[in-house]
Amino acid sequence: MPGKYAPPTGELLLARNSQGEPIGCVALRALGSSNSGCCEMKRLYILPTARGLGLGRALVIAILDIAYTLGYDEIKLDTLPSMEAAIGLYKKVGFVETEAYYDTPLAETIFLARSLKNFDGLTLAL
């Protein structure tokens, strides 16, 4: 899966349980030249058996920190209304609804964005 998620402009994080089995992931990629200084969070997924433990929050904070460290000013994402828990998490860590940043055939797609200026991952982690 690296490709567009590969360094130096992207990243892929994989969370594993104590047996070394993958239980969650999140990815980051640069957005096109029309969104200079902007990146996109993609592929956040937590296995159902690992949900409710704070792993999703930890992965989101980690990818925000990486985006900040890579020098991005803003991070965007898209989701669907049915992803209620994820939307709640995104809003808790500072994402707000924004205009569409690409054309999608799914009219119900929700677009969110978060500024990375003055990002403080430690405060979010508390």
Image: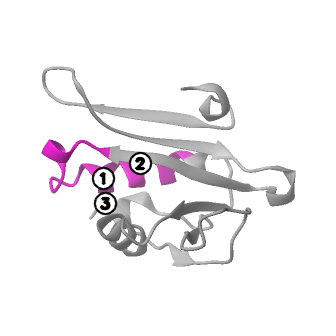
Mark linked to residue 6: none
**At label 2, which amino acid type do we have?**
Leu
In which quarter of the view is residue 100 placed?
Answer: bottom right
Decide: marks 2, 1 in contact (CB < 8 A)? yes
In which quarter of the view is residue 8 placed?
Answer: top right
Decide: marks 1, 3 in contact (CB < 8 A)? no
- The residue positioned 21% from the left and 20% from the top of the image is 20
Label 3 sits on a secondary structure element that is helix
Q: Is residue 27 above or below residue 34?
A: above
Question: Residue 45, how many percent across, how many down?
Answer: 35, 46
* Residue beneath disc 3: 125
Looking at the rendering, the stretch of residues picked out in magenta corresponds to: 46-66
Q: Is residue 16 above or below residue 126?
A: above
Residue 43 colored in magenta in the image: no
Instruction: First in sequence, mark 1 or 3: give its number.
Output: 1
Question: Residue 82, how many percent across, how many down?
Answer: 36, 68
* Residue beneath disc 1: 56
Question: Residue 66, how many percent across, how many down?
Answer: 53, 45
